[in-house]
Image: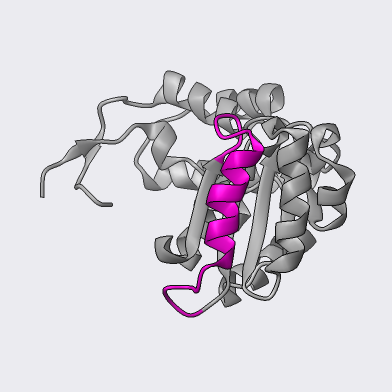
Amino acid sequence: MVDRPVSLSERLRPKDLQDLALGEKTIARLQTMLDVKEPVNMLFYGPPGTGKTSTAKMFVEARGQLGCLELDGSLQTGVSEVRTLVDRFASCYPLDPGMKLCFIDEADYLSQNAQASLRGIIERYDATCRFIFAVNDLSKMHEAIRSRTVCIDFAVAVVSPNVRERVQKRMEDRLTKLGVQFDAKRLDLIFSVYFPDLRRVVKQLEFEFGSLGTSVPNGT
């Protein structure tokens, strides 16, 4: 195998639900759905960097690529994309057993017509396909979409100090496991400034303590 460079920030991206800045009850419910590979329709909302996309990717990985469709709502914004891509995917017979999953990132960029089309698709194929939306601005999502999904707030950590304590401790453990030398007081300050923006936390840790050229075997 040929080695490939892997940055510290990539190594520190959330890979487990406990790495997320969410409450324990929410994590427990998400974990149950992840274990059985059958999520409900969900809408993840909150500021950038709080783990919305990483959480959705965990469900995508658990389901497997054959049963998933991923779209970038900031690029594929129109009703034509919804009708040709999403409706076709949701309506076709699954290639393998289990509930299909459609993940639309940056869904708050979807046009109002695209969102209107989605509400019918969600209802029509509920028995075979589930949807996860990730948005920064919940107010841009049509009420009809919100009413058809479980809306999960990824900014909850702002008012939950115990969440920060858990995530910070897990970050410390991961840095130690990776053999990264870090200053605990400086890490605490970084968390106090940037948390719950985990992306900013990780980028700052990489800048101060990491090596951009770290290599690991390909595929790990």
Q: Residue furthest left?
A: 1
Q: Is residue 55 visible?
A: no
Residue 80, magenta (yes or no): yes
Which image quadrant for residue 79? top right
So how many labels did they put on this image?
A: 0
Which image quadrant for residue 40? bottom right
Residue at 76%, 65% in the rendered image: 123
Taking 101 as reference, is 2 above or below it? above
Color style of the picture: one colour
Taking 70 as reference, is 67 above or below it? below
Which image quadrant for residue 121? bottom right
Residue at 20%, 47% in the rendered image: 218
Q: Residue furthest bottom?
A: 97
Residue at 58%, 63% in the rendered image: 90
- In the visual, does 78 lie left or right of 119? left
- In the visual, does 31 lie left or right of 64? right
Q: Quick one: 135 or 204, which is closer to the camera?
A: 135
Residue 134, magenta (yes or no): no
Q: Is residue 126 visible?
A: yes
- In the visual, does 126 lie left or right of 61? right
Q: Quick one: 185 or 27, which is closer to the camera?
A: 27
Give the image location of residue 2, x and y in percent: 11, 43
Q: Which residues are magenta?
A: 72-97
Give the image location of residue 5, x and y in percent: 24, 33
